[in-house]
Image: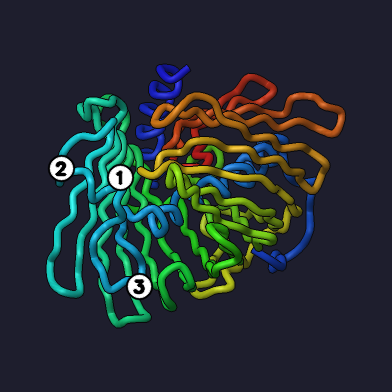
Amino acid sequence: MRTRIILAILAAVAIAGCSGGGGLGLGTQNNNSQATQQEIAQAATEAGLAPVEQGSLQVGLFNGNMGVPLSTSRSPLSTFAATPNGSCNNGVEYIVTVISPTQTQYETKYFYDKACVSLAKDVVALVTVNSASNESIVRTAKDYNLAGLLLSTRNTNYAITGAPLNFSAVLTGDVLIGTSSSPAVQFGHQFTVAPQSGSVYTIAANSGKVVNNGNPHINESFGHMGVLSNGTMTIDSSTNNVTFAGSHAGTFFKGPFGSLTLSSTPPFTVSGGTELGTNNVSGSVTFDKFGNIVSVSITGTLWNGDAINVTSSGTPPGVSINGSITDPSGNNVATFQVDQNGNGIITYANGQQALIIDWHVVR
């Protein structure tokens, strides 16, 4: 299955080259009848993978591979401090470069193999300490396939205020597919973390995204926004694993290509287009001390009663994330599978397939 996914993703870059690229609904109207089965399946996939995507952006603030936010120490946590700069550790390389007393660059390289030969993902984070209670991070993550071809570039800006493990963060950025210079995805995410008890912390969050699909056969934009409730983040003291859990309620939109807009500041909202409906998902995502996905367990429903189920199999760094979408009668609507970087395929009930790159359906 991995070979199949990689071959499909190779095709995705060619497609991208041709194309150039939560909370209350603000759509113009609710028009569920206009959503095709594939659009509904895309909405379900976006809903099911959103917690994994958001967790992958948050985990670096808690496992130390971007330093300890708002700490006077620029050193990484013991997990990374024990690994010499640039040396291979079970498929991961870690490099810390102190630029000045207020700036440090952290680079984490993830490989397909444990010998660190075939690069899968390169994450570079430039951390700037503006004051004792204010920090900013410019993070660039590049995903590659087994042939070394660039799949996607995710640019994320972090604005953090507060104190260590008791702070508020605003994340904004975009995703470029292949070598395109036009963002295929624009996203915003705001969350706050505060101590609850022991190694458990509460998290409150809202998020929004716009996915622009310029494929001539689609030529549409899709939007999603939502709010996290009962959110928690737990750090395992024995393994340093980080687990995010909670429930997420969101609203979906679609419209002509380029017709949807995302607010530039939180709470992040989508405007324009047609409101398709809402979803509710809940579950948990666990990452290991290096930021690799350990396990995923997410379930949910869409506005039309379709069910979403996302699980994982395998062990880090080779975890596979598997999803299924079924209608209220239990009939298959679509299935999907991605690797730990969010790259893979979705297969619809009619046998047609689409590509998922960096947690988003690119058709």
Q: What residue type is labelled 1?
A: Lys
User: For the residues marked 2 and 3, what is the alpha-carbon distance in whole angstroms?
Assistant: 25 Å
Quarter of the image where one finds residue 340: top left
Q: Using the image as rendered, state which of residue 153 and residue 33 is in the foreground.
A: 153
332 above or below 300? above
Residue 207 seen in the figure = no
- Dot 1 or dot 2: first in sequence order is 2
Specify the amino acid type for callout 3: Leu
Residue 58 image position (x, y, % from top left)? 45, 56
Using the image, tell me which numbered label, if any, was put on residue 70.
Answer: 3
Amino acid type, callout 2: Gly
**Along the horizontal axis of the image, is 82 left or right of 201?**
left
Question: Badge 2, how many Cα within 10 Å: few under 14, some, many 20+?
Answer: some
Residue at mark 1: 142
* Residue nearest the observer in this picture, 51 or 129: 129
Vertical relation: 232 (above or below) 95: below
- The image shows residue 296 at horizontal and vertical percentages of 57, 37
Circle 3: element type? loop
Q: Mark 2 points at which residue?
A: 86
- Graded by Cα atoms within 10 Å as few (under 14), some (14 to 19) or many (20 or more), the crowding at tag 3 reads many
The part of the image, by quadrant, that contains residue 30 is: bottom right
